[in-house]
C-alpha cells in the first residue's frame, strides 16, 4: 500500500480536476450528474485508500516525498473530505432541481456548478497532503476562488452579498497569512535555505530551532491571524454565517465540514513547526485564545431563533472554537478529542446541511425564518435534523460528547482548568440555543402552511440519516480506543 | 429489572463490591458496590410496580409504544449511572438520564405548555449539569474516583471547587432550592408512570452522585459542607412544603413535595457530615442511614402518589383539587392506596415516612446536643424547622386527602368514578404494602444502611424490628403499630353497633349544597394569612351586581413562586438583552468586518511588540 | 417500683378526665361561681355512653374509625409517658419524639374526619388547629430538646431523672424550657389565651370544632381523649420541668403536687387572661421558640452548668 | 530596492484611499504596479532568471489588471458618486496612522533594509484599510490589489529571490481572485444598479 502513496497523492486531486473538465463537456444536466458521479467515485476511493494507509500507520513517522506529506492528521482530513465530498455530489441534483435562476442558462449553470464543485474538491483534497507551507497557501487561496463562485451560485442578491464578503475578507486574511509566509521565507533565506523547499514542513521543522525568534513570532502571528479568517475563528468569522446560509446546501456542507478543518490543520502544522522557536507558551496561548473567543462569541447568536442553515453555521463557529481549544491544550487526551471531534462534527454538520434540502422543499420560507414543527410535515427530515442537532450539542451517544469530554479533560490535564471550566459553561449555554431549535423547530407545532413531503422525495434523506448516523455511532466506538493510541501520541508530539 | 434489583440487594447484603472498582480512566467500566446496590434495590422496588402499573396505563395513551420504549431506556440509563465506574460512562448515562424522560414527555404530548416545561427542564438541568462535569472531570484528573486520598493530596482548593461544583451540579438535578425551578414544571406534564420514576428515582440518583462525591471521593469533608447541607435542607424542606401547600393542582403539589423530601434527606446528610466532623462515627452512620432510609421511603410513597394521581386523572379527568372528592368510597383500592401514601408522606406513625423522619429528627437533636455552639444551634434550628415541615406536610396532606378522597364528590365525573384495571391497582397496592412494611420493621433495614456510611465497617447497630438507638427511648415501630391496631379494633368493638338514623351534616339548618363545600384555598387560608409577608398571595374578587342585587361572585387567587420572580426571570431577561447587544457584532457591513481583521492584526502585532506573547 | 409506676400509668386512663373537671371547678371558684364539680366529666361520659352514635350521610370509613383511633393514640401515649421517672413494661418505648408522632396522628384523624363530614365549622376549626400546630410542634420539639440536653437522650425516663435535683435550676436553659413547655401545655390542652374550651359558638372553636358531628360513644371517646391529653401534658410538665428529687415515692408525691400546681395555674391563667386573636397565636409561639433556642444556646455555651 | 520607488508605492497607496473618481484610482494603482515592476526589474541584476521572469510577470500584471478594471467601470456606470464613508482628510489620517503602526510595530524581519520591510507591511495593512474606508465595490477590489502589491514588494526583495513558483502561483491566484471579484462586482452592479457596498447589508443578526 505504502508504495502506491506517491502515485495516489498525485492521482487523487488530478482525478478531481479531470472530473471538472468532464462535466464541462456535458450536454444535459443528467449527463453532467452522471459524469460527476462517475469521476467522484474513483476519486473518493483513492482518497479513502490514502487515508486508510495513513491511519493504518498509527504511530509510525509520516510518509513524505518531494511534494507531499502524509501523516495521521492528513489521513483523517482526507477521509472526511472524501466522504463529505461524494455525499455532496450525490445530493447536488436534489439542490439543482429546485435552484432558481443563476449566473447563466440552466443547462450551462449546472455543469458550471459541477465544475466549480470539482475544482473546490480537488483543492480541498490537496490541502492536507501537500508538503509545503507556501503550496498549501496557494491551494487554500484557490479554494476561495472556487467556493466564492459556488456560494453566490443561486445569484440571489443575498447570495451575491455573502459571496462578496467571503471573497474580500478571506482574500485579505490570506494576504496577511502570505505576508507571514514571506517573513518565514526571508528568515530561511538568511539561514541559507533558498528556494521553495525551504518552506517544506519538514525543512521548516528542521530549521525551526535556528530561526530568529522575533521575526518568527511576527510570522506566526500574521499566519494565524490570516488563517483564522479562513477557519472562521472569532473575531474574523463574520463571513462564515452569511456564506454558509446562502450557499447551496451541498456546498455549505463542504465548507463547514471540510474546508474549515483542513485550514485548521494547516494552522495546526504551523503551530507545531514554529513551536520550538516561538515557544509553546505563545503558540498554545494564541490557539486557546482564538478557541475560547469563538465559543463565547457563538453563544449569543445561537440564542436567537435562526434559520436552519444559519444556526448550523454558528454552531460551526462554536465547534471550530472547540477544536482550536483542543489543539491549544495539546495534551494527548485533548488531541484524541480533536481527532474525534473533527470527524464527528463533519458527519453531523454535513447531515444537517443535507437535511436543509428537503426542509426548503417543504417550507420555502425556512431560508429566512426558523423552522417550525418539521416533524408534522416530514418525519424523516425531522429525524435527520434531530440526529444532527443532538450530535452537535454533544449529547451521548454522539462522538462529540466523548470528544468534548476528552478535550476538557485534556485541558485540565494541561493545567488550564479555568479555561476548560469556562468553555464547559459556554458550551452549556450554547446548548440552550440548539435545544430551542430542537424543541420548537423540530418537534414543535407549525403555524405556517407547508407542502407535505412526498414519500418518494424522502428516500435520499432517510438513507443519508441511516448511513451518517451509524457512522457517528461507529465513531463513538472508535473514539473509546483513541486515548493512549500511538496514532494520537505522535500527533500530540507534533512530529512532522 | 427485577433481576437487577436482586443483584443490587445481593450486593447490598453481601456487602462486597461486584464488577469493576472505580477508576479514573476513560474506557467504560461497570460494576456495583453496596451503595449502588442499595440504590439499585430501591430503583427495582419502585420501578417494578410502576411498570406493572404502566402495562395497563400506557396502551390508552398516545404514542404508547414509543413512550414504553423510552421508559425502558430511561430505566437503563438510571441503572447505568448507578453502575458506572468511570467518568465517561457516568457522564454519558447522566446525560441520557436527563434527556430520555424529556423525549418521552414530548412523544406523549407536544402542546406549547409541555414544550416550554420540557425546555425549562432540560435547560436548567443541563446548565446545572456543568457542575457535575466540572466536579467529575477534576476528580478524574486527580485520579480521585474511588480513591479519597488522591484529592486530599491535591489540596483544599481543589477540594472546595469539587465540593461546590458537585453541590451545584447534583443539587440542581435533585431539586434543592434555589435550583429547583425545573422540578414543578417538568413533573406535572409527564405521564403518570414517568413522573413516578422521575420524582421517585431520578432525583435520588442525583443524590447518589452527591453522596459519592461529597462523602467518598473528596476525602476529609470540611465542616462548612455539613452546615451548607443543613441550610439547603432546611430551605428546601420548608420552602418545598410551603409552596406545595398553596398549589391547586395535585401533580404540581406532589412535585413541590419532592423538593421538601429531598430537603429532609439533605438534612440527614448534613447531620452525618457534622457528626463525622466531630468524630462521632456511630451517630454519623445513623444519620447517614436515616438519609438513605428516607431516600427509599420517599421513592416508594412518591411513586405511589404519582401513580395514584395518574389513576385519578384517568378516572375523573383533571386534577384540580377543588373538583374532586368522595373517591375513597368509589374507588376503594386506588383510594386506599393513595390514603396510605398520603399518610406516609405526612410522616404519621406507624408508616415508613415517620420512621425515617424520626431518625432524621433524632440525628438533628443529637447534633444540637454537642459543641461547638454554632453547630449545636444550627442543629436546633434545623430540628425546629423539620418539626414545622412535618406539621406543614400533615396540614397539606390532610387537605389533599380531604379534597380528593373524602367528603361529597365535587363534580359529576367523581360520582361515576370506578377502580382502575387490575395492573394499575396491583402496582399501587404493592407500593402501599411496602409503605406499611417499611413502617413496621424499619429496624431490619437500618443496621445494613449504617454499614454503608463512609468509614464504617460492618454495622454499628443491633438488628431489631423497631429502631433501638443509643441516646433515645427507642421506637418499637412494630409493637406500636400492633398496639394501635389492637386498641382501635378493641374500641370499635366496645363502641358497638348502635347508630341513629342517617342524617345530613349540620350547616345551621340550611340544605347541604355544593357551594358550601370547603375549598383548598379555604383550608389553607389561616396559614396564608399568617405567612402573608412570605407567600405574597395574589387574590382577586369580582362581584357582578345588577340593580343592587349581587348576581355572582368569582374569586381567583394564586401564590406566585417567589424565586422565579426574584431570581430566574431577571436572570433570563438580562441574559437575552446582553445577547442582543452582543449580536451587533454581526452588523452586516463588510467594512466593519475588514476593520475587525485590521484590528486583530494590529492588536496581535502590538502584543508581539510588547512581548505579551512571551 | 416499676409495677407501681405501671399501676399509676393505668390509673391514668381512669383519672385523666378528672383533670379538666378539676380545672373547670377551680376556675369557677376563682371566678366566684359555684361551677360544676370536678367529677362532672365522668357524668358527661356516662350520659354519652348511653346515647346512640350519629351516622352521617356520604361519609366514609374515616369518619367511622377516627374516634377510636384518636383514643387509641392517647392510650399509647399514656403508656409511653413515665411517672416518677419509671414506666411499666408496655414495650412501646419511652421516646419523646414518638410522642410527637402519636399526637400528630390523632390530629390527622380528627381533621380527616372533619373533611369527611364536610361540615364547614369542623373544617374551620381543623384548619386552625393544624395551622397553630405548625408552630406548636416546633415549640414542643424545642422544649423537649431543652429537656434532653442534660440527659443527652430523648428517653423520657432519663430526661426526668436528669431534671431531678436542685442544681439544674441554676441553668437558665431549664427556666427557658419550663417557660416554653408551659406554652405547649396551654396549646395542647386547648386553654386560654389560645383556645376557649367553654365556648359554644362554633365560629370560635378550635379543639371542640371537629367534635361537632359526633355523638354517643364516639363523642365519649373524643372527650376522654381530650382529658387524656391534659393528663399526658401535665405529667410531662411536672416530670421534666418541675422540681423533684429523692426516691420513687417522693417523686410520685411531688408529681401529684406538680400536677395540682399546674391545674391551679391553668385555672388562674384562664381566669386572668383574655383569649388571643387567632392570628396572634403564631407570634406567641414564635416567641416561645426564640426563648427555647436561646436556652439551648446558653446550655451548649455552658452558661450556669 | 530603490527607496524612492518604495516611497512612491506608499504614497500612491495612500492616494488610492483619498481620491474620489474610480478612473483616477485605477490610474494610481497602475502607477503603483508599474513602480513595483520597475523596482523588481532593477533588482534582477546579478540574480537568477527566476526573478527576471517574476518581474516581467509583475509588469505585465501592471498593464493587464488596470485594463480589466477599466473595462469593468466602463460596463458599470455609477448613477452618481457614492457617498463617502468619511471625508478625505479623515481617511488619510486613518491610513497614516495605520502606516505608522506598521513602522512602529514591525521589528526587523531579516531583510537588509528596514525601509522596504516597513513599506511592504504598511502596504498590506493599507490594502485592508482601503476596504475599511471606501464604500464603492471597486475600491474594495483595489484594496485587495494594493495589499497584493505590498506582498510582491516583499517577495521580490527577498535575498536570492523567493522562488518564482511561489511568486507566479501567488500572482496567478490573486489574478484569479481579482477576475472572480470583477465578475462579482459586475453582477452586483447589475443587481443593485450601483457599486455601493452599504446596500449589501441584507445579512445581519
Image (tube, coloured by chain):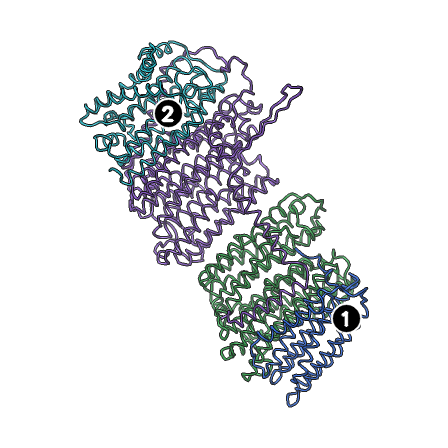
- Left or right: D205 in relation to A60: right
Q: On what subunit does the disc labeled 1 rest?
A: D
Q: Nearer the viewer, residue A48 or A168?
A: A168
Q: Which chain is cyan?
A: C
Q: Count residues near mark 1 (Cα–Cα under 10 Å), then give few for <14, some for 14-19, many for 20+.
A: some
Q: Quadrant of the N terminus of chain A?
A: bottom right
Report the side of B475 relative to A58 (left or right).
Answer: left
- x and y percent of residue B470 in the render? 27, 37
Of the numbered discs in the image, which one, if any, rests on residue B137? none
Chain letter for the part of the structure drawn in blue:
D
Q: Which residue is mark 1?
A: D22
Quadrant of the rendered image containing residue B189 = top right
Judge whether residue A179 can be spotted in this image.
Answer: yes
Residue C120 at what x, y percent from top left?
49, 20
Q: Quadrant of residue A315?
A: bottom right
Is the residue C92 above or below the residue A318 in the image? above
Q: Secondary structure at mark 1?
A: helix
- The answer for which chain carries disc 2 is C
Q: In the image, residue D145 lies at what x, y percent? A: 70, 73
Chain whose colour in the figure is green: A
Amino acid at each position: 500500500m505504502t508504495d502506491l502513496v506517491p502515485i495516489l497523492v498525485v492521482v487523487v486531486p488530478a482525478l478531481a480536476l479531470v472530473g471538472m473538465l468532464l462535466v464541462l463537456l456535458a450536454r444535459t444536466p443528467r449527463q453532467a450528474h452522471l459524469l460527476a458521479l462517475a469521476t467522484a467515485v474513483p476519486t473518493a476511493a483513492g482518497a479513502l485508500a490514502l487515508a486508510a494507509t495513513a491511519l493504518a500507520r498509527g504511530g509510525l513517522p509520516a510518509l513524505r516525498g518531494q511534494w507531499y506529506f502524509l501523516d495521521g492528521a492528513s489521513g483523517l482530513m482526507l477521509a472526511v473530505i472524501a466522504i463529505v465530498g461524494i455525499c455532496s455530489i450525490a445530493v447536488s441534483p436534489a439542490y439543482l432541481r429546485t435552484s432558481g435562476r443563476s449566473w447563466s442558462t440552466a443547462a450551462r449553470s449546472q455543469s458550471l456548478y459541477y465544475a466549480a464543485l470539482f475544482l473546490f474538491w480537488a483543492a480541498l483534497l490537496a490541502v492536507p497532503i501537500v508538503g509545503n507551507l507556501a503550496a498549501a497557501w496557494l491551494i487554500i487561496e484557490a479554494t476561495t476562488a472556487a467556493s466564492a463562485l459556488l456560494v453566490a451560485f443561486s445569484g440571489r442578491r443575498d447570495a451575491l452579498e455573502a459571496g462578496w464578503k467571503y471573497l474580500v475578507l478571506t482574500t485579505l486574511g490570506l494576504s496577511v497569512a502570505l505576508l507571514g509566509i514571506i517573513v518565514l521565507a526571508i528568515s530561511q533565506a538568511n539561514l541559507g535555505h533558498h528556494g521553495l523547499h525551504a518552506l517544506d514542513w519538514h525543512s521548516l521543522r528542521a530549521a525551526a530551532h535556528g530561526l530568529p525568534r522575533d521575526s518568527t513570532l511576527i510570522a506566526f502571528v500574521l499566519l494565524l491571524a490570516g488563517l483564522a479568517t479562513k477557519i472562521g475563528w472569532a473575531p474574523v468569522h463574520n463571513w462564515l454565517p452569511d456564506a454558509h446560509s446562502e450557499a447551496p446546501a451541498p456546498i455549505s456542507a463542504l465548507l463547514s465540514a471540510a474546508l474549515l478543518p483542513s485550514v485548521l490543520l494547516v494552522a495546526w502544522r504551523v503551530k507545531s513547526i514554529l513551536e520550538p522557536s516561538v515557544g509553546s507558551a505563545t503558540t498554545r496561548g494564541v490557539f486557546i485564545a482564538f478557541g475560547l473567543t469563538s465559543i463565547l462569541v457563538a453563544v449569543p447568536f445561537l440564542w436567537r431563533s435562526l434559520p436552519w442553515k444559519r444556526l448550523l453555521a454558528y454552531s460551526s463557529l462554536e465547534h471550530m472554537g472547540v477544536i482550536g481549544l483542543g489543539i491549544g491544550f495539546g495534551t494527548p487526551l485533548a488531541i484524541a478529542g480533536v481527532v474525534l471531534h473533527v470527524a464527528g462534527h463533519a458527519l453531523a454538520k454535513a447531515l444537517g446541511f443535507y437535511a436543509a434540502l428537503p426542509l426548503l422543499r417543504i417550507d420555502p420560507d425556512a431560508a429566512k425564518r426558523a423552522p417550525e414543527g418539521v416533524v408534522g410535515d416530514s418525519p424523516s427530515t425531522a429525524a435527520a435534523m434531530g440526529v444532527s442537532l443532538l450530535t452537535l450539542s454533544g449529547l451521548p451517544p454522539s462522538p462529540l460528547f466523548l470528544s468534548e469530554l476528552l478535550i476538557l479533560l485534556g485541558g485540565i490535564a494541561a493545567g488550564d482548568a479555568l479555561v476548560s471550566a469556562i468553555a464547559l459553561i459556554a458550551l452549556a449555554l450554547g446548548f440552550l440555543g440548539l435545544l430551542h431549535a430542537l424543541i420548537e423547530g423540530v418537534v414543535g407545532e407549525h403555524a405556517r402552511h407547508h407542502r407535505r413531503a412526498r414519500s418518494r422525495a424522502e428516500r435520499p434523506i432517510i438513507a443519508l440519516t441511516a448511513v451518517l448516523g451509524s457512522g457517528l455511532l461507529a465513531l463513538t466506538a472508535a473514539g473509546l480506543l483513541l486515548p493512549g493510541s500511538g496514532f494520537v501520541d505522535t500527533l500530540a508530539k507534533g512530529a512532522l | 429489572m427485577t433481576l437487577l434489583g436482586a443483584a443490587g440487594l445481593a450486593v447490598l447484603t453481601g456487602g462486597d463490591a461486584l464488577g469493576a472498582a472505580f477508576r479514573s480512566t476513560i474506557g467504560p467500566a461497570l460494576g456495583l458496590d453496596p451503595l449502588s446496590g442499595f440504590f439499585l434495590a430501591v430503583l427495582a422496588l419502585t420501578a417494578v410496580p410502576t411498570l406493572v402499573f404502566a402495562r395497563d396505563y400506557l396502551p390508552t395513551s398516545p404514542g404508547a409504544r414509543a413512550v414504553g420504549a423510552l421508559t425502558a431506556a430511561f430505566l437503563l440509563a438510571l441503572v447505568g449511572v448507578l453502575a458506572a465506574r468511570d467518568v465517561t460512562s457516568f457522564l454519558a448515562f447522566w446525560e441520557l438520564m436527563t434527556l430520555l424522560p424529556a423525549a418521552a414527555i414530548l412523544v406523549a404530548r407536544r402542546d406549547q405548555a409541555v414544550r416550554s416545561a420540557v425546555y425549562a427542564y432540560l435547560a436548567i438541568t443541563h446548565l446545572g449539569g456543568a457542575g457535575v462535569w466540572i466536579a467529575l472531570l477534576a476528580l478524574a484528573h486527580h485520579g480521585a474516583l474511588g480513591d479519597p486520598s488522591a484529592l486530599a493530596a491535591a489540596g483544599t482548593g481543589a477540594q472546595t471547587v469539587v465540593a461546590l461544583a458537585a453541590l451545584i451540579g447534583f443539587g440542581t438535578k435533585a431539586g434543592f432550592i434555589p435550583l429547583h425551578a425545573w422540578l414543578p414544571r417538568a413533573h406535572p406534564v409527564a405521564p403518570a408512570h414517568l413522573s413516578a420514576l422521575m420524582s421517585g428515582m431520578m432525583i435520588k440518583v442525583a443524590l447518589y452522585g452527591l453522596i459519592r462525591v461529597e462523602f467518598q471521593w473528596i476525602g476529609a469533608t470540611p465542616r462548612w459542607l455539613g452546615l451548607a447541607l443543613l441550610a439547603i435542607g432546611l430551605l428546601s424542606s420548608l420552602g418545598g412544603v410551603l409552596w406545595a401547600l398553596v398549589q391547586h393542582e395535585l401533580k404540581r403539589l406532589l412535585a413541590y413535595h419532592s423538593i421538601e423530601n429531598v430537603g429532609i434527606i439533605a438534612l440527614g446528610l448534613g447531620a452525618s457530615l457534622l457528626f463525622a466532623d466531630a468524630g462521632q462515627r456511630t451517630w454519623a452512620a445513623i444519620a447517614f442511614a436515616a438519609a438513605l432510609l428516607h431516600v427509599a421511603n420517599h421513592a416508594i410513597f412518591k411513586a405511589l402518589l404519582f401513580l395514584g394521581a395518574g389513576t385519578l386523572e384517568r378516572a375523573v379527568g383533571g386534577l384540580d383539587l377543588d373538583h374532586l372528592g368522595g373517591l375513597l368510597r368509589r374507588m376503594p383500592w386506588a383510594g386506599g392506596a393513595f390514603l396510605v401514601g398520603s399518610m406516609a408522606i405526612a410522616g404519621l406513625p406507624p408508616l415508613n415516612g415517620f420512621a425515617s423522619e424520626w431518625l432524621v429528627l433524632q440525628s438533628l437533636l443529637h447534633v444540637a446536643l454537642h459543641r461547638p455552639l454554632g453547630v449545636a444551634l444550627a442543629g436546633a434550628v434545623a430540628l425546629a424547622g423539620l418539626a414545622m415541615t412535618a406539621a406543614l406536610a400533615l396540614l397539606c396532606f390532610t387537605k389533599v386527602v380531604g379534597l380528593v378522597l373524602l367528603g361529597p364528590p365535587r363534580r359529576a365525573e367523581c360520582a361515576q368514578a370506578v377502580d382502575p384495571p387490575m395492573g394499575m391497582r396491583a402496582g399501587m397496592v404493592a407500593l402501599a404494602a411496602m409503605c406499611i412494611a417499611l413502617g413496621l420493621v424499619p429496624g431490619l433495614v437500618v443496621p445494613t444502611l449504617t454499614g454503608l456510611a463512609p468509614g464504617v465497617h460492618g454495622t454499628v447497630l443491633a438488628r431489631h424490628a423497631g429502631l433501638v438507638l443509643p441516646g433515645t427511648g427507642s421506637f418499637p415501630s412494630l409493637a406500636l403499630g400492633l398496639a394501635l391496631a389492637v386498641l382501635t379494633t378493641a374500641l370499635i368493638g366496645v363502641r358497638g353497633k348502635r347508630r341513629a338514623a342517617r342524617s345530613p351534616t349540620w350547616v345551621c339548618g340550611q340544605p347541604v349544597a355544593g357551594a358550601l363545600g370547603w375549598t383548598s384555598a379555604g383550608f389553607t387560608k389561616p396559614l396564608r394569612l399568617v405567612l402573608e409577608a412570605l407567600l405574597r398571595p395574589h387574590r382577586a374578587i369580582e362581584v357582578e351586581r345588577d340593580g343592587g342585587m349581587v348576581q355572582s361572585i368569582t374569586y381567583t387567587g394564586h401564590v406566585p413562586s417567589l424565586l422565579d420572580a426574584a431570581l430566574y426571570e431577571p436572570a433570563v431577561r438580562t441574559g437575552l438583552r446582553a445577547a442582543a447587544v452582543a449580536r451587533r457584532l454581526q452588523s452586516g457591513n463588510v467594512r466593519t468586518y475588514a476593520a475587525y481583521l485590521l484590528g486583530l492584526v494590529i492588536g496581535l502585532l502590538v502584543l508581539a511588540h510588547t512581548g505579551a506573547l512571551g | 417500683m416499676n409495677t407501681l409506676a405501671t399501676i399509676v400509668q393505668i390509673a391514668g386512663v381512669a383519672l385523666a378526665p378528672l383533670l379538666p373537671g378539676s380545672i373547670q371547678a377551680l376556675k369557677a371558684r376563682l371566678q366566684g361561681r359555684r361551677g360544676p364539680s370536678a367529677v362532672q366529666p365522668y357524668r358527661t361520659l356516662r350520659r354519652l355512653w348511653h346515647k346512640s352514635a350519629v351516622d352521617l350521610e356520604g361519609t366514609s370509613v374515616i369518619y367511622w374509625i377516627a374516634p377510636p383511633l384518636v383514643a387509641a393514640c392517647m392510650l399509647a401515649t399514656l403508656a409511653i409517658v413515665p411517672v416518677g421517672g419509671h414506666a411499666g413494661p408496655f414495650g412501646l418505648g419511652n421516646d419523646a419524639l414518638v410522642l410527637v408522632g402519636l399526637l400528630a396522628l390523632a390530629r390527622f384523624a380528627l381533621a380527616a374526619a372533619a373533611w369527611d363530614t364536610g361540615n364547614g365549622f369542623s373544617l374551620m376549626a381543623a384548619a386552625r388547629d393544624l395551622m397553630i400546630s405548625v408552630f406548636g410542634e416546633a415549640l414542643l420539639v424545642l422544649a423537649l430538646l431543652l429537656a434532653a440536653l442534660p440527659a443527652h437522650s430523648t428517653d423520657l425516663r432519663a430526661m426526668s431523672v436528669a431534671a431531678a435535683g436542685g442544681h439544674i435550676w441554676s441553668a437558665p436553659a431549664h427556666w427557658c424550657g419550663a417557660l416554653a413547655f408551659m406554652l405547649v401545655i396551654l396549646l395542647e390542652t386547648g386553654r386560654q389565651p389560645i383556645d376557649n374550651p367553654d365556648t359554644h359558638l362554633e365560629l370560635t372553636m378550635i379543639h371542640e370544632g371537629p367534635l361537632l358531628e359526633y355523638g354517643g360513644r364516639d363523642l365519649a371517646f373524643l372527650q376522654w381523649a381530650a382529658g387524656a391529653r391534659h393528663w399526658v401534658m401535665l405529667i410531662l410538665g411536672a416530670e421534666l420541668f418541675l422540681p423533684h428529687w429523692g426516691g420513687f415515692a417522693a417523686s410520685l408525691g411531688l408529681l401529684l403536687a406538680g400536677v395540682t400546681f399546674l391545674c391551679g395555674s391553668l385555672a388562674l391563667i384562664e381566669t386572668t387572661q383574655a383569649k388571643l386573636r387567632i392570628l396572634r397565636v403564631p407570634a406567641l409561639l414564635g416567641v416561645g421558640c426564640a426563648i427555647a433556642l436561646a436556652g439551648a444556646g446558653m446550655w451548649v455555651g455552658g452558661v450556669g452548668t | 530596492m530603490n527607496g524612492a520607488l518604495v516611497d512612491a508605492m506608499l504614497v500612491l497607496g495612500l492616494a488610492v484611499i483619498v481620491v474620489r473618481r474610480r478612473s483616477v484610482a485605477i490610474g494610481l494603482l497602475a502607477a503603483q504596479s508599474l513602480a513595483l515592476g520597475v523596482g523588481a526589474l532593477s533588482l534582477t541584476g546579478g540574480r537568477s532568471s527566476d526573478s527576471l521572469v517574476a518581474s516581467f510577470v509583475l509588469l505585465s500584471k501592471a498593464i493587464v489588471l488596470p485594463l480589466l478594471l477599466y473595462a469593468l467601470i466602463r460596463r458599470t456606470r455609477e448613477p452618481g458618486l457614492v457617498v463617502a464613508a468619511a471625508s478625505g482628510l479623515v481617511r488619510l489620517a486613518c491610513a497614516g496612522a495605520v502606516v505608522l503602526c506598521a513602522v512602529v510595530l514591525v521589528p526587523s524581519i531579516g531583510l537588509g533594509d528596514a525601509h522596504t520591510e516597513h513599506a511592504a507591511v504598511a502596504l498590506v495593512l493599507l490594502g485592508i484599510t482601503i476596504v475599511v474606508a471606501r464604500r464603492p465595490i471597486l475600491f474594495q477590489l483595489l484594496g485587495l490589489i494594493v495589499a497584493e502589491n505590498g506582498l510582491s514588494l516583499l517577495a521580490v526583495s527577498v535575498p536570492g529571490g523567493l522562488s518564482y513558483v511561489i511568486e507566479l502561483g501567488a500572482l496567478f491566484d490573486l489574478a484569479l481572485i481579482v477576475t472572480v471579484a470583477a465578475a462579482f462586482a459586475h453582477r452586483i452592479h447589475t443587481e443593485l444598479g450601483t457599486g455601493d457596498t452599504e446596500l449589501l447589508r441584507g445579512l445581519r443578526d
